[in-house]
Image: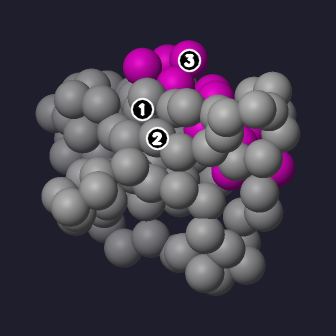
Amino acid sequence: MLDHQLRGLILRRYYDARRKKWSQLEWNPADFDGLVDALDFSRISIVLAEYGLIDYYPAEGTDEWGQPGSGQITAEGIDVVEGQNEPPIAYLGTRATEKIY
């Protein structure tokens, strides 16, 4: 899977988690149907955070590339997914009205 596809899939998962009791998304392989591994989750989450689309917190006691951390979508990320703002980085299939993988 290409990085822009991974960004879209992961950003959409953060979006979908926003209204849960614990709005932070943590790495769970079952959430991604085998399409995203732990390293890609961490790597893409860091990129999304650099662009202000999510807040990402690496797991305690590890560097940012270690064990996957957790994060939550920002207001900017929600606006991008819902089509209110243009994305600051290329991604695929994350509009709130679109079906994802």
Residue type marked 1: Ile
Name the side, left or right, on which 58 lies relative to 83.
Answer: right
Stretch in magenta: 39-52
The location of residue 49, given as percent across then percent down, is 52, 25
Q: Is residue 31 above or below residue 81?
A: below
For residue 71, the mark is: 2
Q: Residue at x 63, y 27 (%)?
A: 47
Of labels 2 and 3, earlier in sequence is 3
Residue drawn at x 83%, y 39% as measured from the top left: 66
Mark 2 in CB contact with mark 3 (< 8 angstroms): no
Q: Which mark is residue 87?
A: none
> Alpha-carbon distance for marks 1 and 3?
8 Å
Q: Residues under labels 2 and 1: Cα distance?
A: 7 Å
Disc number placed over residue 54 in the picture, else none: 1
Regarding residue 88, the answer to whether it shows in the image is no
Q: Is residue 77 magenta?
A: no
What residue would you read off at disc 3?
50
Residue 32: x and y in percent read: 60, 73
Image location of residue 71, percent across then percent down: 46, 41
- Helix or strand or loop: what does disc 2 sit on? strand
Labels 2 & 1 near each other (Cβ < 8 A) = yes
In the picture, measured across the screen, residue 7 lies left or right of residue 14, that is right
Q: Residue furthest front?
A: 61
Disc 1 secondary structure class: strand
Quadrant location, the N terminus = bottom right
Residue shown at 60% from the left, 38% from the top:
45
For residue 17, side relative to residue 68 (left or right): left
Q: Position of residue 95 (x, y in %)?
A: 31, 53
Q: Residues within 10 Å of mark 3 (few under 14, many from 20)?
A: few
Dot 2: few (<14), some (14–19), or many (≥20) neighbours within 10 Å? many
Residue type pointed to by label 2: Gly
